[in-house]
Amino acid sequence: MGFTPEELQAARDRLVPDVVASGLRVLFCGINPGLMTAATGHHFARPGNRFWPVLHASGFTPRLLRPAEQEELLAHGLGITNVVARATAKADELTAEEYREGGRLLAEKVARLRPRWLAVAGVTAYRVAFGDKHAAIGPQQRTLGDTRIWALPNPSGLNAHWTPATMAEEYGRLRAAAFAEN
């Protein structure tokens, strides 16, 4: 799926529809769509992004899904949204105000959809969006109504601190918690 640099730039600021339903077990939340995601309309679409392989390796999906198969997540009780809706080339193009407003809108979305877990894929984005500068990877003290929150490592290929194996382990901890509940 090759896009020219011009086609990718044309996707800047484009919105990508959420993959959501009421009562999900886990609502995964990216930071914001990248340009490849915006160009394709599929979450975590950049080839170097490790979200889909890690989701499978951690046991959330029975097989490796492609970004174009994102709607299949709903059958597994999973969904995807973002802290900030607008697409950028890099997350550092977002302002702290956009993160805070994104956190407010995300809290409204969670109140409406009522997933069991909100899994924010990027602890730094979680810290800024929810004003919790001491948050660490793992389950959080804060809840949004009855929804528990888990901060996950960002699956971007730029996040070199986490290998696919260590990310799959952390995502697997969330899966065990989310599916241990009735």
Image: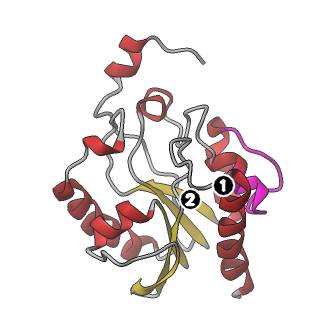
Residue at image x 83%, y 56%? 62
- Which residue, as the protein is rendered here, is positioned at the far left? 97
Left or right placement of residue 180 versus residue 107 in this view:
right
Q: Position of residue 82 (x, y in %)?
A: 41, 54
Mark 1 and mark 2 in contact? Answer it, CB < 8 Å: yes
The kind of secondary structure element at disc 1 is helix
Q: How is the image coloured?
A: secondary structure
Q: What stretch is highlighted in magenta?
A: 54-66
**Mark number, residue 91:** none
**What kind of secondary structure does the magenta stretch mostly adopt?**
loop
Q: Distance between the residues labelled 1 and 2?
A: 6 Å
Q: Position of residue 91 (x, y in %)?
A: 34, 44
The kind of secondary structure element at disc 2 is strand
Q: Is residue 36 above or below residue 81?
A: above
Q: Earlier in the sequence, mark 1 or mark 2?
A: 1
Residue at image x 62%, y 39%? 67
Taking depth in this image into account, of 16 and 158 the one nearest to the observer is 158
For the N terminus, the image quarter is: top right
Residue at image x 35%, y 78%? 134
For the C terminus, the image quarter is: bottom right
Q: Which residue is the site of mark 2?
A: 79
Where on the picture, by quarter, is residue 73? bottom right
Where on the picture, by quarter, is residue 89? top left
Q: Where is residue 90 in the image (x, y as percent from the top left)?
A: 36, 38
Left or right placement of residue 134 versus residue 81 in this view:
left
**Mark number, residue 73:** 1
Q: Is residue 46 above or below residue 53?
A: above
Left or right placement of residue 137 versus residue 123 in this view:
right
Name the residue type under label 2: Gly
